Image (tube, grey):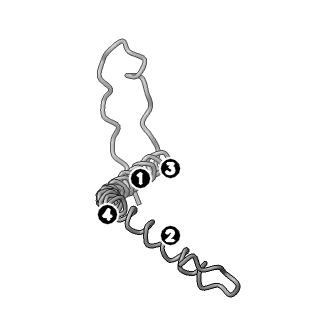
Amino acid sequence: MWKETPTPEAPRTTSPAASTKPINEDELRSILDRLEATRDIFRENRELRGVLSRRDAETQSLRTRNSELEEIMRKFAPMLLNAATTMGLAAKNEMPGARSDA
């Protein structure tokens, strides 16, 4: 599968890394597999960041809408309370055996 190539001459330095032996086919395959896995992880990371960005925009939009709805409820709460109180009093007066103060 792999062509055997002559080993390049190691550079002449005093560092221990200069005396390393060349890698074999299994080691190269392992390195390539790890590089491919790393590439896949980075791709998935990019995709997840995109999804997260969209979700963040949706969350912000929903928060804005929620604030608008809360403001509407604050405006109408007194009127709704009055209507509920009136309906409760009217229902109480229509109950059998209830006294009518009118």
Q: Earlier in the sequence, mark 3 or mark 1?
A: 3
Of residues 69 and 42, the one drawn nearer to the viewer in this rendering? 69
Residue, x 59% and y 85% (percent of image)? Answer: 94
Asked whether residue 30 appears in the rendered view, the answer is yes
Give the image quarter of residue 6: top left
Give the image quarter of residue 17: top left
- Locate residue 34, reporting x and y percent: 45, 49
| Relative height, residue 97 to residue 51 (above, below) | below
Report, in whole angstroms, how far the alpha carbon at label 2 lies from the one at label 3.
82 Å
Q: Which residue is mark 4?
A: 72
Residue type of the residue flagged with mark 4: Ile
> Around disc 1, counting alpha carbons within 10 Å, would you say few (fewer than 14), some (14 to 19), or many (20 or more)?
few
| 20 sits to left or right of 9 | right
| 85 sits to left or right of 48 | right
- Judging from the image, what secondary structure is the residue with disc 3 in? helix
Q: Is the C-beta separation of discs 4 and 2 under 8 Å?
A: no
Report, in whole angstroms, how far the alpha carbon at label 4 lies from the one at label 1.
46 Å
Q: Which residue is mark 3?
A: 26
Q: Earlier in the sequence, mark 3 or mark 4?
A: 3
Report, in whole angstroms, how far the alpha carbon at label 3 lies from the one at label 1.
22 Å
- Numbered tag placed on residue 85 in the rendering: 2
Asked whether residue 47 appears in the rendered view, the answer is no
Q: Which residue is mark 1?
A: 41
Q: Earlier in the sequence, mark 4 or mark 1?
A: 1
Of residues 101 and 34, the one drawn nearer to the viewer in this rendering? 101
Q: Is the C-beta separation of discs 3 and 4 under 8 Å?
A: no
Q: Is the C-beta separation of discs 4 and 1 under 8 Å?
A: no
> Around disc 4, counting alpha carbons within 10 Å, would you say few (fewer than 14), some (14 to 19), or many (20 or more)?
few
